[in-house]
Image: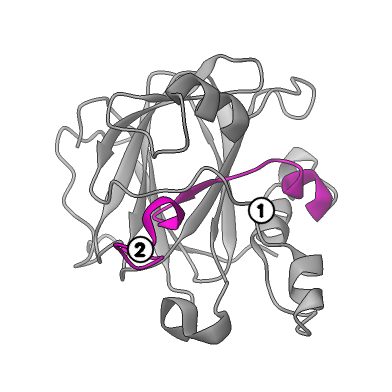
Amino acid sequence: MTIIKITSSTPSPHVKPLSNDTSSSKTHTVCGGHGHAFEVKKGTCFRVIDLHGTQIVDMMAWVLPYPSSLEHLSMAYTRYHLNGTAPPAVGDTLVTNKSEPIFKLTHDDCHTHDMTFMACNPAFYAEKGIPDHRSCAQNIAEAMEPWGMKSYLEAASVDPFNIFQNTPDMTLKDLGCSRAGDFVEFEVLKDAVVGVSSCPYDVDGFGGGKATDIAIVTGLKPGSA
């Protein structure tokens, strides 16, 4: 079962205030080490916020209707369109396995993300001797159950956009280098369902040894950042 906490009317001190917001915007706080899935509409924006700092977020997305469209956010096609593995810059687009834009990056406080690593999954942790450890693929599969996803292997077949993960430049920054309140915002270019996981990887003290909460804000107007 996906664990989701709906924030109260009092904003978190870690969440930057919204400007040009609409009454249709919604904020969800996703528990550390768990996942969440949500639909987004073309022409709106959504945010992924690191509430406490150094928390990596795995993000996947599928074009609606899922699963019949077979179209999903693709890191391989995005790397090709961006001509390399460097993180996208504000104004760049993430594309699908149909080679079409799905999201446009409109705001980025961290400027450090990964497009090369897979999502951790149950088999990954079993190999490390911790078979009951939560994983990003399982988190997203659980969150996607209402849309018909039946196995973590369906999520594991899609490489995630690893938000706030510093794999490309580890010699200069920590692997998780975002600060409390840092966020990315995307403009939606295709109706989609998005799955996110507050990465539960905590081996060897990574991320302080504990996954922390993240926030998702949906239904924003372009230009809200």
* Badge 2 element: loop
Quadrant of the image containing the C terminus: top left
State which region is magenta.
152-177
Which residue matches tag 2? Answer: 171
Q: In which quarter of the image is residue 157?
A: top right
Q: Which amino acid does label 1 sit on?
A: Ile
**Magenta region includes residue 164:** yes
Query: Residue shown at 80%/44% (left/top)?
Result: 154
Mark carried by residue 140: 1
* Residue 10 location (% of width, % of height): 22, 64
| 128 displayed left or right of 215 | right
Q: In which quarter of the image is residue 204?
A: bottom right
- Could one spot residue 122 in this view of the protein? yes
**How far apart in space, not on screen, are marks 2 and 1 (Cα)?**
30 Å
Asked whether 118 or 65 is in front, the reply is: 118
Quadrant of the image containing the N terminus: bottom right
